[in-house]
Amino acid sequence: MLFKDNAVIHWAIMSLKEDCLQIFFFTMAGNHLTQRLRRLMFQNFLQQELSFFDEKSNSTGALCSKLSGEAALVQGATGQRIGTVVQAFGTVFIALVLALFYEWRVGLVSLCFVPLISIILYKESNMIQQETFGAAKSMQNSSKIAVEAVANIRTVATIGREALFVKEYEDQLRPALLLAKRATHWRGIVFGLARGVYYIIYAASMFYGGHVIVTEGVPYDLVLKAAQALLMGSGSAAEAFAFAPNFQKGINAAGRIIMILNRKSKILDPDQPVIENFRGTGEAKMQSVQFSYPTRPAVEVLKGLDLEIPKGQTVALVGSSGCGKSTVIQLLERFYDADAGLVALDGASVAQLRLAELRRGLGLVQQEPVLFDRTIGENIAYGDNSRTPAQDEIIEAARQANIHNFVMSLPMGYDTNIGSKGTQLSGGQKQRVAIARALVRKPQILLLDEATSALDTESEKIVQEALDVAKEGRTCITIAHRLSTIRDADVICVIHAGRVAERGTHQELIDRKGLYYRLYKQAQ
């Protein structure tokens, strides 16, 4: 008796150790897998071309939902659950072997139910697949609304539309709830049937076991052992089946993640760049360029545009809204590839240059500067993607951008955190930080996309002074609605109907009394 007690205690200790190790290692493996999937997805998102983000299905909210939700579903099918299922299937296998060993005919009874179990699992899988697809779509749409509302909360509060966004958010969640309600009834029936099958197997094995005992004189203890083994296996199978919804959702999510990871950007580095370690001189050219945005292929923005940008000159692009001015900058940055024609720096097609080297020589300042929730110094340093700028270089860039004195007036100086999107700074201050960020990389070409159009008169004057300093010794391509800011440009190009319609200095174009003259008069 003492021997049996010691054996039971020994078995309990072994089981405790096994369960602890199983939970630890499988849980850690699941967490590492989830973290790795999220990192790979995020990395893949950032490597996509800009047209990928123009698609409605790839809004900020939808991508954030995929980033968090898909990996979480995979995690729900891994970790400790994997260990439990592996253990359960091992138990089922051993139970079946024991049943066949003790009384093979009783063991075969259980195998007769395999087709029924397979059908149940198949129906369960289909229902879960439909439910998870609808839920994922609903979560992406609702996340898009939530991100949009939170990111623009000041505007939402100003116009008093909080209730509207809450209603839209709720409306996007409702389809998933309705789908879940419909699926729940059937899932309940299928799940109950699946759990019941295992007890039916036990009952059938006992019934048939009784038959062979009576008719063939098979020892009772062998039949009982076989039936008990099947009961043990049935219990483990039922435990594993409880995780079937999680596994099906995880499998579906894994499939969607693989599709994301397999998507390659349409804009890639060339296999053999025409120039190694490209450092441009500041000369740019566009020849017979045709272009339509991928989301609007029927609308041709540029229709054979020709543009010469000599080294060291300031070239201003003007024209009505939608004429293609900003498109020129986006093609030079190779955010998109031209449908036809040549876009070149120093005579080399931008498609034949490495992206990092191409963009290293371009400094972009946009109408609405985008700053990160970091310190001022970090935001400026982010401008150089090839190295980590020294503090002296950051300060020099800030001086050129006419922001250094303001930064030094702050208690934390360059270590001041400016908040999300630079909310701690005024519009003019944010723009000057953005200019410093563009200058710290020492670009050969400065791209100014309506850099002062969103500022008040006083801020515009300060920023314009910073831009005048920034232009010195560089090629500059500037886009402006306020024609007063580009009067001193070396060359002004008027873009109309996707082409350069006029070209010359301010006075030359005024004397010509063409498109530029009419634009100038309208601005008076």
Image (cartoon, rainbow, N blue to C red):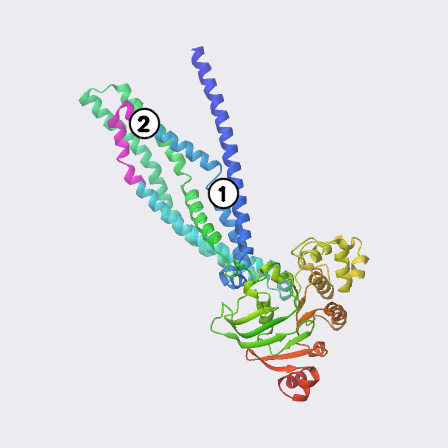
Q: Residue 75, labelled with which disc?
A: 1
Which amino acid type is shown beneath numbered disc 1?
A: Gln
Left or right: 199 in relation to 298: left
Residue that lies at the very extreme toward the left in this rendered image: 215
Give the side of residue 278 with respect to residue 265, left or right. right
- Magenta stretch holds residue 66: no
Q: Which residue is mark 2?
A: 97
**Amino acid found under the numbered disc labelled 2:** Val
Span highlighted in magenta in the image = 100-117
- Is residue 146 visible in the rendered image? The answer is yes
Graded by Cα atoms within 10 Å as few (under 14), some (14 to 19) or many (20 or more), the crowding at tag 1 reads many
Callout 2 environment at 10 Å: few (<14), some (14 to 19), or many (20+)?
A: some
SS type, badge 1: helix
Give the distance between the C-alpha atoms of the residues marked 1 and 2, in whole angstroms. Answer: 32 Å
**Residue displayed at 47% across by 50% down:** 257
The one of 192 and 353 positioned closer to us in this rendering: 353
| Percent of width and height locating residue 264 | 49, 56
Residue 241 position, x and y percent, is 39, 38
**Left or right: where 123 falls relative to 176:** left
The quarter in which the N terminus is drawn is top left
Whether the residues at callouts 1 and 2 have beta carbons within 8 Å, the answer is no
On screen, 474 above or below 25? below
Whether residue 524 is visible: no
Along the line of sight, the residue nearer the viewer: 377 or 169: 377
Q: Secondary structure at mark 2?
A: helix
